Amino acid sequence: MVKEAPHALVPTVRHADYLGAWLEILREDNRAVFKAASAASKAADFLLAFGADEAGAARGKGEGASSSGRPPCLRR
């Protein structure tokens, strides 16, 4: 049996506000999209490294992370 939250959240769609915020950012910095994409890629690498670590540990091979144990986006 699933209980409902006493104050359920109602999703709202605010496309215009979202796009307006990006337009404002881009007016100030025309490379903002590239910076955001780079940060998103690093975040994805970081999160995916955990899945690879777990999969490697399950197989006993230790694949995924480098010998330093750091995710790919933090390796230097």
Image (tube, grey):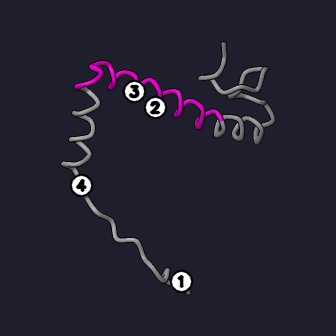
- From the image, which quarter does the N terminus lie in? bottom right
Residue at (69, 39) in percent of width and height: 55
Q: Are marks 3 and 4 in contact (CB under 8 Å)?
A: no
The kind of residue tagged 4 is Arg
Q: Give the alpha-carbon distance from disc 3 to disc 1, as whole Å.
A: 38 Å
Which residues, given as a range, are shown in magenta? 27-49
Looking at the rendered structure, which numbered label has been put on residue 40? Answer: 2
- Which dot, 2 or 4, sits closer to the camera? 4
Front one among 65 and 23 = 23
Query: Which one is nearer the viewer's eye here, 59 or 17?
Result: 17
* Residue 2 placement, left or right of 54: left
Q: Quadrant of the C terminus?
A: top right
Residue type at mark 2 is: Ala
Give the labeled residue for mark 1: 2
Label 3 close to label 1 by CB (< 8 Å): no
Q: Secondary structure at mark 2?
A: helix
Q: What residue is rendered at 39% in x and 27% in y?
A: 37
Residue 11 in the image: x percent, y percent?
A: 33, 65
Q: Is-magenta flag for residue 74?
A: no
Secondary structure category for the residue under label 1: loop
CA neighbours of label 2 inside 10 A, class few (<14), some (14 to 19), many (20+): few
Q: Which of these two is toward me, 13 or 22?
A: 22
Q: Which mark is residue 14?
A: 4
Between circles 2 and 1, the one closer to the viewer is: 2
First reached walking from the N terminus: tag 2 or tag 1 = 1
> Which dot marks residue 37?
3
Q: What amino acid type should be assigned to the residue bearing mark 1?
A: Val
Tag 3: residue type?
Answer: Ala
Q: CA distance from mark 4 to mark 1?
A: 29 Å
Q: Secondary structure at mark 3?
A: helix
Q: Are marks 3 and 2 in contact (CB under 8 Å)?
A: yes
Report how far apart the C-alphas of labels 3 and 4 lie in the structure.
22 Å
